[in-house]
Amino acid sequence: MSIRKNIILNGIANIVSRTVRIADQLLLIPFFLTEWGAAYYGEWLTLTTIPSILAFLDLGFGSAAGNSFVLTYSSGNHQRAADIYKTGLKVITYAVLLCITISIIVMLIALHTGLLSKSLISPEDAVWSFVFLTTSRITGFYNQLYGAMFNCKHRAATATNYLTVEGFVRIGVGIAVLTMGYGVVVFALGNLVVAVVFNVVYAILGLHILGPLPKGKYDKTIAKSIFSKGFGYMASPIWQSMYFQGTTFIVRIVLGAETVAVFNTVRTLCRSVNQLYSVVNHSIFPEMQIAYGSGNVDKCRKIFIYSIKTVFFVACVGTLFLFVFGQPLYSWWTQNKLTIPTSLWYTFMASIVFNSTWWTAGCVFRVINKPYRFALYGFISAFASTILSYFFAREWGVTGAAIGYTAMDVLMAMLVLPSACQCLGIKLKNIIISKHS
């Protein structure tokens, strides 16, 4: 199967997957509100905060192990790949057991100190549901490693489709549990059962698609590398949180709560374009990594240049769409309850093209499994953007805050794109003229 066809299949799979994720967030809400009521549902959302954060962070170990496996397997060193798989499983399992243990200890402390006594959810139910939900979420730590086996055989779309099916089943089980009148414990247990069953099947299916693999052994050197790179991958969600939440916090302090609503809603609508080129990134990543791991850097360069041009075009079209239809759409969306300065709107739109460039270029650091340089660029840019947002907000109001926010995308484009080109041996000017050395 051609690379172009694989990328298209990956794209379709990712679009469907994102649709299911949105459905997971939206479809269950009416059932929650009908069966549990708003207050009880609010308590449940509060209870799910920590498990959701853990799932988001993923501790980075799955990404580190999975990327190492693909690069090593693609290079032809199957014995080393088997050792990475064995070691990665052990490291991830330690991380999972540690998280489960900590969650149990935290909830037992909360139970015995009376911190849960004021909740609408009974303390015992809160403890059990929290542990079940935490366990179900962190089983996702294995997904990157299992998915790597699919990627090695150009079957990334199959892996994504499989996880999409899991999402459908999880939604169905959730609706069934709610309509039958069960509470938080059974709902969390249902999530756990689905996660464990699908995780086991996912691993078996991945090994089947990969084919025979030598008997691997635990390697301390590999384990240290996974730990090291894992924390590098974990750094990205941290600086992204600092960027998004930091600018929101500054707007609140300097300009007030109502301005936060204006700032965040405009930002959300403008960033909706990001979802389009995020699909491109997820589509090209597996093929780029296989090409790089197998030593076919020329093919990797071609895919990279093609993806940069594609997302640039998508970003330009998205920006044009928002320029023409954005403000009427925003007014309809907010029911004309929020008034925004035109300068704020144009400032946020200016960030879209810059964001598309660095976000796509950033996948190179995952391809070559070197996350720290990208994390460093992120921390530098996020810190600078947060500081600028504060001073600009004091000087020019909400538009000033948006200028500081946009500075992040400009800085990242200036840092990440040249660095990514350097990693692949591409001259920056050749991104435009479609030649590479």
Image (cartoon, helix red, strand yellow):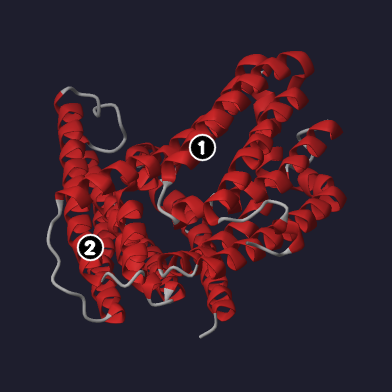
> Between residues 44 and 436, which one lies in front from this camera angle?
436
Image quadrant of residue 294? bottom left
Using the image, determine if residue 208 lies above or below residue 189: below
Using the image, determine if residue 402 lies above or below residue 369: above
- Residue type at tag 1: Gln
Q: Which mark is residue 85?
A: 2
Mark 1 touching mark 2, by CB under 8 A?
Answer: no
Q: Which mark is residue 240?
A: 1
User: Residue 335 at what x, y percent from top left?
Assistant: 76, 43
In what quadrant of the picture does the C terminus appear?
bottom right
> Between residues 299 and 166, which one lies in front from this camera angle?
299
User: Residue 315 at what x, y percent from top left?
Assistant: 73, 54
- Residue type at tag 2: Tyr
* Image-based side of 202 in relation to 233, left or right: left
- Give the Cα separation between the discs numbered 1 and 2: 29 Å
Say which residue appears at 82% left-offset and 38% top-offset: 346
> Between residues 59 and 233, which one lies in front from this camera angle?
233
Q: How many marks?
A: 2
